[in-house]
Amino acid sequence: MVNAEKFISQSVTEIQKAAGNEKVVMALSGGVDSSVCAAIAARAIAENLIPIYIDTGLMRRGETERIRTLFGNIHLQIVDAGDEFLEALTGITDPEAKRKAIGERFIRVFEREAKKQGAKCLLQGTIYPDRIESEGGIKSHHNVGGMPLHMEFTKVIEPIRDLYKDEVREVAGALGLPKEIQHRMPFPGPGLAVRILGEVTKEKVAIVREANGIVEDELVETYRPWQCFAALLGLGTGVKGDNRIHGWIVAIRAVNSRDGMTADPLNIPFDDLVRIGSRITAEIPQVARVVYDITAKPPATIEYE
């Protein structure tokens, strides 16, 4: 395990050396990785740190409002770029292409915001599993393999690039971050786009966002999973009332893991699964059926794309 206090001290020095007197924009999503980076960077470069939260339009239910409340005391800049991301994803169905489109759009938005601030450095919360999966060809993370080859930033600073998720949580505790942040369930950088098989549309995002919210409502407090969510698999047939419908198939995914490199499905009682499925089909009229994913990692990944 990491020596948290020593790591924090070394990271402060590393950021100061890398940034010099330059202003630094950083990607703050509100998850534990970016929050740890923000706390360390604030110690290192103080007012030269410019934290930015990009609302991609692919976020969880109520996420932007939560971020605004949680980080309102650090002059967080919130950028609404939802239309840009949806436009960048139009017509794309290949999972890798979607991740790369999202990665490039993130960089372009950060470049634009950095120019306004006179910043030339980008700081982000890449962790070791992101690098392993991107460099190993498993999948491109938006902040590693999904990043464009050409960027206007002179430096990209990644202070937690060698840590696993459980080590990041340990550092968060040493930094005194709130438990809500320290133990927050992971959420993918590309957002709900990787929980939609095929092309991403505004309608699909709205459906999977609501289904995801129901799954979190039902499972997070009761089962404390490492990660749980809903994904939109495709279209299927069903019956609602006296009518045959052609509606969406939603998959529930809930796993336990230590570091995200391997994961096991949660053994959820059948009655609870039936209740969740009933809620999703009743509250989201476009959904025709619900399934539960029992696949471990490996052979599956945790997310669907």
Image (cartoon, rainbow, N blue to C red):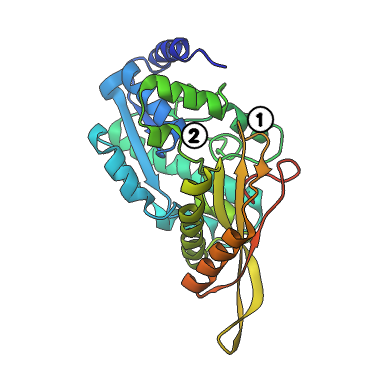
Task: Tell me where residue 41 appears, x and y as whole percent.
Answer: 37, 22
Task: Give the SS element for disc 1.
Answer: helix
Tag 2: Cα neighbours inside 10 Å, few (<14), some, or many (≥20)?
Answer: few
In this orientation, which residue lies closer to the viewer: 289 or 104? 289
Q: Is residue 205 visible?
A: yes
Residue type at the position of mark 1: Ile
Q: Residue at x 61, y 31 (%)?
A: 129
Q: Residue at x 55, y 60 (%)?
A: 200
How much space separates mark 1 and mark 2, taking CA atoms? 22 Å
Reply above or below: 19 against 27: above
In this orientation, which residue lies closer to the viewer: 209 or 215? 215
Image label count: 2
Reply above or below: 145 against 289: above
Name the side, left or right, on which 37 lies relative to 219. Answer: left
Task: Tell me where residue 229 appears, x and y as whole percent.
Answer: 55, 52
In this orientation, which residue lies closer to the viewer: 144 or 223? 223
Name the side, left or right, on which 120 lies relative to 192. Answer: left
Tag 1: Cα neighbours inside 10 Å, few (<14), some, or many (≥20)?
Answer: some
Name the side, left or right, on which 71 lies relative to 82. Answer: left
**Residue 91 found in image quarter:** bottom right
The residue carrying mark 1 is 132
Q: Is residue 121 visible?
A: no
Task: Give the SS element for disc 2.
Answer: loop
Q: Which badge, 1 or 2, is on the more N-terminal residue?
A: 1
Q: Quadrant of the N terminus?
A: top right
The residue carrying mark 2 is 151
Task: Tell me where residue 15 appears, x and y as whole percent.
Answer: 41, 17
Name the side, left or right, on which 72 lies relative to 259. Answer: left
Reply above or below: 146 against 212: above
Residue type at the position of mark 2: Met
Q: Residue at x 37, y 53 (%)?
A: 62
